[in-house]
Image (cartoon, rainbow, N blue to C red):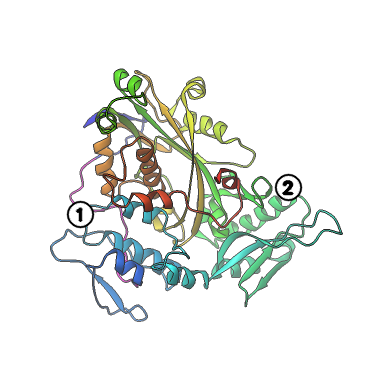
């Protein structure tokens, strides 16, 4: 049920029902399917395809509607795995499950899951680990073991070495161990940030990577520990280094005053309270601008944005709420509440802008805000086409169609878990969904402070 629709002055596409399942999900014409992907979608039909070097071709069951397709650009193992995973989760289905959505967002295979360990080993064998060695606190202190701060693909390592040493400084590449050390020769964070920026600018000037066409002039932190920032990197280039990315996401919702006042009170039937929440709650959903470089036109959380170096998470959330939704600062400070974090590792496709197959380890701070009557989010900075106040059921329907940006679907599922809408009783994949939205990350950063 559509209750309200607010758009910017520019024309924006309204929500419309799509007759084609997953019209926003890009599937490969040809792909390899691992044992894990066959397990996820055992009914997926496979036949010999004509493409040399990629012998498996996906054949969709004739009884289902067709889907949009995209061809894998090369034989890169990361691209092939990610595209095959998306195919196994969507092909032949009229609706994506909540676990499907989680596995698209948290796409990188797990080393400790028997069904995914072979894929993990295969992908890791093709990546270079970006290491950082911390200087000992004194000359008598034993050397600290190197810390992993990112993951680079072969072509990124080659591009880094192609940058003149006068710009990048010394870079140590161990081809056998598949490790890279860079920017360690500079003694201070500002100097290292400047060197990383010079490398990114060189790549941009020489059109080395398509993703840098979306240059944002925003610096994102790269951590060497829970709190120490080693250097900062241009936002659009963070994925090239495979470093940990940080952001803030907020869900704004409304509740009838009677339901709001009774939520969380003692007594009463828990199931009834959950049903009341599901039936009474309305959620503000944004649609991304159709001209946005990343995931254009897809549905999104109410407000979300990247966390820049030097920011405090809540102040970042206040800034984004003003820029994207015109929500007043005072309202945010009075009503917005931090609800913890989510962590996961995504593998991008073409919708993310630029090269597919980038490794995105991510941590997001999560916020909720219950908006009072009369407060309506309004687009401000052009990144949002409009906002719509939707029922829980309508949001769930759009989730099942794959309408949301992948990590925003993850944030919505986390929201549903906390509000008792998604439970073990009504979701067979509940435990795995919750585990995947709180993945243990192999990189340092603020998430280490949230470990129980």
Question: Which disc number belongs to residue 272?
Answer: none
Q: Position of residue 336 (x, y in %)?
A: 47, 27
Q: Position of residue 55 (x, y in %)?
A: 32, 79
The quadrant of the rendering that contains the C terminus is top right
- Residue sitting farthest toward the front: 267
Instruction: For mark 2, give the secondary structure.
Output: helix
Seen at 39% across and 44% down, the residue is 408
Please name whichever residue, 13 or 91, is drawn nearer the observer in this view of the structure. 91
Question: Which disc number belongs to residue 94?
Answer: 1
- Residue 87, relative to residue 343: is it above or below? below
| Majority secondary structure in the magenta region | loop
Q: Position of residue 254 (x, y in %)?
A: 34, 25
Q: Is residue 60 left or right of residue 158?
A: left
Q: Is residue 234 magenta?
A: no
- Residue sitting farthest toward the right: 139
Q: Position of residue 448 (x, y in %)?
A: 59, 48
Residue indicated by mark 2: 190
- Residue 308, relative to residue 113: is it above or below? above
Q: Is residue 142 left or right of residue 8?
A: right
Which corner quadrant of the image does residue 241 belong to?
bottom right
- Residue 445, relative to residue 369: is it above or below? below
The span shown in magenta is: 16-32
Instruction: For mark 1, give the secondary structure.
Output: loop
């Amino acid at each position: 049920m559509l209750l309200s629709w607010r758009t910017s002055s520019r024309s924006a596409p309204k929500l419309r029902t799509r007759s084609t399942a997953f019209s926003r999900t890009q599937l490969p014409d040809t792909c390899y399917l691992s044992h894990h992907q066959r397990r996820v979608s055992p009914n997926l039909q496979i036949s010999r395809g004509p493409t040399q070097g990629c012998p498996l071709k996906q054949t969709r069951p004739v009884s289902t509607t067709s889907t949009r397709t995209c061809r894998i650009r090369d034989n890169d193992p990361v691209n092939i795995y990610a595209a095959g995973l998306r195919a196994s989760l969507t092909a032949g289905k009229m609706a994506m499950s909540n676990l499907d959505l989680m596995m698209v967002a948290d796409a990188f295979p797990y080393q400790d899951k028997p069904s995914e360990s072979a894929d993990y080993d295969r992908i890791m064998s093709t990546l270079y680990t970006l290491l950082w060695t911390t200087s000992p606190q004194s000359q008598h202190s034993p050397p600290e073991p190197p810390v992993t701060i990112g993951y680079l693909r072969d072509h990124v390592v080659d591009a880094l070495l192609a940058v003149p040493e006068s710009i990048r400084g010394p870079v140590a590449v161990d081809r056998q161990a598949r490790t890279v050390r860079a920017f360690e020769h500079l003694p201070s964070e500002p100097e290292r940030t400047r060197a990383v920026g010079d490398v990114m600018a060189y790549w941009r000037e020489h059109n080395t990577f398509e993703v840098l066409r979306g240059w944002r002039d925003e610096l994102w932190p790269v951590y060497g520990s829970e709190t120490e920032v080693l250097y900062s990197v241009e936002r659009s280039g963070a994925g090239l280094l495979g470093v940990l990315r940080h952001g803030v996401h907020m869900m704004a919702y409304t509740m009838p005053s009677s339901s709001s006042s009774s939520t969380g009170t003692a007594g009463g039937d828990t199931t009834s309270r959950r049903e009341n929440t599901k039936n009474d709650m309305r959620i503000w959903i944004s649609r991304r601008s159709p001209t946005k470089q990343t995931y254009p036109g897809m549905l999104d959380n109410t407000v979300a944005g990247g966390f820049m170096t030097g920011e405090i998470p809540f102040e970042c959330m206040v800034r984004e709420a003003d820029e994207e939704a015109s929500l007043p600062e005072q309202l945010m400070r009075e009503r917005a509440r931090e609800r913890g974090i989510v962590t996961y590792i995504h593998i991008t496709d073409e919708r993310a802008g630029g090269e597919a197959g980038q490794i995105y380890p991510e941590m997001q701070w999560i916020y909720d805000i219950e908006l009072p009557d009369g407060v309506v989010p309004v687009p401000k900075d052009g990144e949002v086409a409009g906002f719509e106040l939707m029922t829980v059921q309508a949001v769930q329907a759009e989730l099942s169609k794959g309408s949301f940006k992948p990590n925003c679907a993850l944030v919505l599922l986390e929201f549903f878990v906390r509000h008792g809408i998604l439970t073990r009783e009504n979701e067979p994949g509940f435990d795995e969904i919750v585990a995947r939205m709180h993945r243990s990350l192999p990189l340092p950063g603020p998430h280490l402070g949230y470990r129980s």
